[in-house]
Image (cartoon, grey):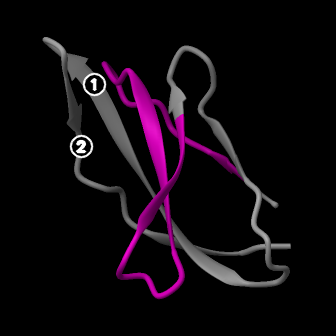
Amino acid sequence: KVDLQVRIVAGADGYILERSEDGKSFTETARTKSDVSTRFTDKTDRAFTKYYYRVRAYKNVGGETVISKPSESVRIKTK
C-alpha cells in the first residue's frame, strides 16, 4: 500500500491519482474532492513493485470537468 499526500492547488475541486508501470501509459486509480482529503492510499495487489505516480487537479466549470495537465511523475516503491 502506498500513501501519497497531494499539495493543494488553489481553486481545484479535487484530484485524480494516476499510476503507471512503465512511466508512459498512466491509468486513473483514485479520485478525491479537495474539501474531503488530499491524501491518496493506493492499494496495490503486488508487493515490492516500483510504480510511477502523477496527479491531476480538476475543476467543475458549468457542468463540465476541466482536468489540468499532469504533475511530474514520481517513481515510488510499493510495499
Please provide percent x and percent y for residue 72. 37, 65
* 21 is higher (above) or lower (below) than 33: below
Query: Which quarter of the picture shows residue 12?
Result: top left
Q: Residue at x 43, y 69 (%)?
A: 73
**Marks 1/2: CA–CA distance:** 8 Å
Q: Residue 54 appears in which quarter of the rendering?
A: bottom left
Q: Within the magenta stretch, is there residue 72?
A: no
Look at the image and say whether residue 20 sits in the magenta stretch.
Answer: yes
Q: Quadrant of the C terminus?
A: bottom right
- Would you place residue 29 above or below residue 46 in this image? above
Q: Amino acid at mark 2?
A: Ser
Residue highlighted by disc 2: 68
Give the magenta part as a residue range. 3-31
Above or below, 70 relative to 32: below
- In the image, is 78 to the left or to the right of 55? right
Q: Which residue is mark 1?
A: 59
